[in-house]
Image (cartoon, grey):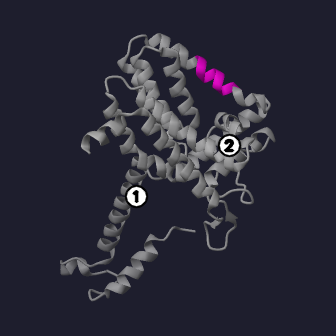
Amino acid sequence: MKDRLKSAVSKKATLLILYVVFALAASIQALLTGPKKYVEEGEHYKVYNNYVIFKQSFHHLKDQQDLYAAYPQEQWDLYKYTPTFSAFFGLFAVLPDWLGLSAWNLLNALVLLFAVYALPRLDPLEKGLVLLIVLIELMTSMQNDQSNGLIAGLLVFAFALLEEKHWALAAFCIVFSAYIKLFGVVGFALFLFYPQKLKLAIYTVLWTVLLFFIPLLFVDLGHYLELFRSYGDLLANDHSTSYGYSVMGWLSDLVRTRAEQEHHCRARRRYLPSADPVEQVGHELPVQVADVGLRGTLDRDLQPQG
């Protein structure tokens, strides 16, 4: 039995079928689930809202609209990607939802799958185990129509291509991942461990310029520059909520929680009298303050100012 399991996990065809089934299952689940509300008295939106946001961004781009404005009649939440990604998503936006969503999830699954199989110095069993380990997280991402599988696959592909000295393709993978989500730029750290840094830098500049100009197929230069101004405003004002379920999100929550605890302690020290009778003079609250009263005072203290 153990040998049969090892043999199944070692086969690329087995993992390929598994990843395709999971991608299609996530798509079918979303398509068959009815609309939902994100707030009690808000609009009903499709469960695959992220896909709708991506799709609508392409239509907003070609219609010369602001990609980063709110469109509550169409979607819940804002578009938080680059104009280049909007142009790229036109490949899916022109398709009916059942086909476009399935193709999008398949792209995320298969790019990651083939990226892992491109890794050097791992045998087929080890590659199969890696793919099984990440499958649950990938499924969660696909159920939310996210781009995490695609970005992870591009970065893994970049490493594999660097190992094979395919400098141009490696640079493309990292640049394209950064044009999807800005944290893809961390992939450039890989360049530090390889020769031909000048060549890598040149390829990076070339791909960056090429991908930058793709949206100009749909908009004029003036509107394009305005989109980047709007994108900058979005990033400046929305970075904390963009972390989502990530290490940065956990760290942000931890820092915020620690800050709130410290503020709470400072407030308690301000209102509670000290043990020194001399220092008790002048305190506004009596020593016998009720805990519920103290909490109410602290809660009022911690409210944001209007």
Q: Quadrant of the N terminus?
A: top left
Q: Amino acid at mark 2?
A: Ser
Q: Amino acid at mark 1?
A: Arg
The image shows residue 89 at horizontal and vertical percentages of 67, 38
* Circle 2 SS class: helix
In the displayed structure image, the side of residue 83 where residue 16 appears, left or right: left
Query: Image quadrant of residue 172?
Result: top right
Residue 207 drawn above or below residue 239: above
In the displayed structure image, the side of residue 217 where residue 8 appears, left or right: left
Queried whether the magenta region covers residue 127, the answer comes back as no
Residue 168 drawn above or below residue 146: above
In the displayed structure image, the side of residue 42 where residue 118 appears, left or right: left
Q: Is residue 243 visible?
A: no
Name the residue at 35% across, 69% down. 264
The image shows residue 17 at horizontal and vertical percentages of 48, 41
Which residue range is magenta in the image?
206-213
Structural distance between the alpha carbons of marks 2 and 1: 27 Å
Residue 212 drawn above or below residue 264: above
Q: Which mark is residue 256?
A: 1
Name the residue at 21% across, 79% down. 278
Which is nearer the eye, 117 or 75? 117
For disc 2, the neighbor class at 10 Å (few under 14, some 14 to 19, many from 20) is some
- The residue tagged 2 is 230
